[in-house]
Image (cartoon, helix red, strand yellow):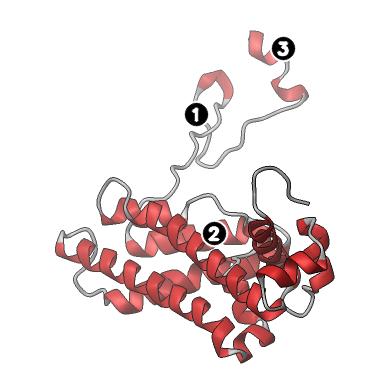
């Protein structure tokens, strides 16, 4: 339930956003929206004509928030590679999936032109912004001239969205992380730096990728030696 300074209409929209993300359109009942928003049936129908109108407002709000989050990365400091890295590596609730991308899997949303429109417009905007950054990187010599900006932008979006699917199927963020790191490698953009190798005997660095040792082998006796 939402509380604080939010108006009733805002609580209803926020509740519907969350429920659409969690349950999809069919699973989002008016009763569930009202309970989560702490609003009565009369309040809901005072502000919105019904579930479709409220769902449309919630989807538009989710789309706006996704654009704002992406634009914060696209308008950040650095060159094209820095901004693409910032976008694909920004903090996400990976195991919940993309709140906009998941709507494309909802047959009720896709079947309704009004509900689908904000989803389609947002993904079209996202590809266009990414294509412009790739073109900038080509022009500045950060990316190979052979890259097609539109096709590369579609690949970036598909990798991120597909990474969500892999992560949810595995119940782990690891597949998402592997997908976006592989994407950055293909683009020639450095991803997250590898951790320093764990020290070996006598303080000599161990092999690349070695994990820090724990347990009895790294206890006081070894440290003192």
Residue 188's quadrant in the figure?
bottom left
Q: Which residue is mark 3?
A: 220
Residue 30 in the figure: left or right of residue 93: right
The label shown at residue 205 is: 1
Task: Give the position of the C terminus as an image quadrant.
Answer: top right
Work out whether mark 1 precedes mark 2 in sequence or the reverse, and give the earlier one: 2
Callout 3 crowding tier (Cα within 10 Å): few <14, some 14–19, many ≥20: few
Instruction: Work out whether residue 20 can be spotted.
Output: no
Q: Position of residue 76 (x, y in %)?
A: 32, 48
Residue 151's quadrant in the figure?
bottom left
Q: Position of residue 19 (x, y in %)?
A: 73, 66
- Mark 1 vs 2: CB contact within 8 A: no
- Residue at the image position 68 percent from the left and 15 percent from the top: 222
Q: Position of residue 131 (x, y in %)?
A: 30, 71
Q: SS for tag 3?
A: helix
Mark 2 and mark 3: span between their CA atoms? 36 Å
Residue 27 in the figure: left or right of residue 16: right
- In this rendering, the answer to whether 180 lies above or below 77 is below
- Residue at the image position 27 percent from the left and 77 percent from the top: 148
- In this rendering, the answer to whether 176 lies above or below 90 is below
Work out whether mark 2 precedes mark 3 in sequence or the reverse, and give the earlier one: 2
Q: SS for tag 1?
A: loop
Give 217 or 80, whichever is nearer the viewer: 80
Give 98 or 57, whichever is nearer the viewer: 57
Give 36 or 172, whichever is nearer the viewer: 36
Q: SS for tag 2?
A: helix
């Amino acid at each position: 339930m939402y509380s604080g300074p939010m108006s009733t209409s805002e609580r209803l929209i926020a509740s519907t956003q969350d429920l659409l993300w969690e349950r999809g359109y069919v699973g989002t009942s008016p009763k569930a929206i009202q309970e989560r928003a702490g609003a009565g049936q009369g309040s809901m129908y005072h502000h919105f004509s019904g579930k479709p109108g409220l769902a449309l407002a919630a989807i538009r709000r989710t789309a706006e928030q996704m654009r704002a989050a992406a634009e914060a990365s696209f308008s950040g400091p650095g060159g094209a590679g820095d901004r693409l890295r910032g976008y694909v590596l920004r903090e996400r609730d990976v195991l919940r999936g993309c709140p906009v991308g998941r709507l494309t899997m909802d047959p009720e949303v896709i079947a309704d032109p009004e509900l689908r429109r904000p989803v389609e417009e947002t993904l079209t905007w996202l590809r266009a912004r990414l294509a412009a950054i790739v073109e900038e990187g080509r022009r500045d010599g950060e990316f190979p001239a052979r890259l097609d900006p539109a096709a590369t932008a579609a690949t970036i979006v598909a990798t991120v969205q597909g990474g969500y699917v892999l992560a949810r199927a595995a119940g782990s963020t690891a597949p998402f992380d592997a997908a976006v790191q592989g994407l950055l490698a293909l683009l020639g953009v450095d991803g997250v730096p590898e951790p320093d190798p764990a020290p070996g005997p006598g303080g000599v660095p161990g092999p690349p990728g070695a994990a820090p040792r724990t347990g009895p082998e790294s206890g006081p006796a070894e440290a003192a030696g």
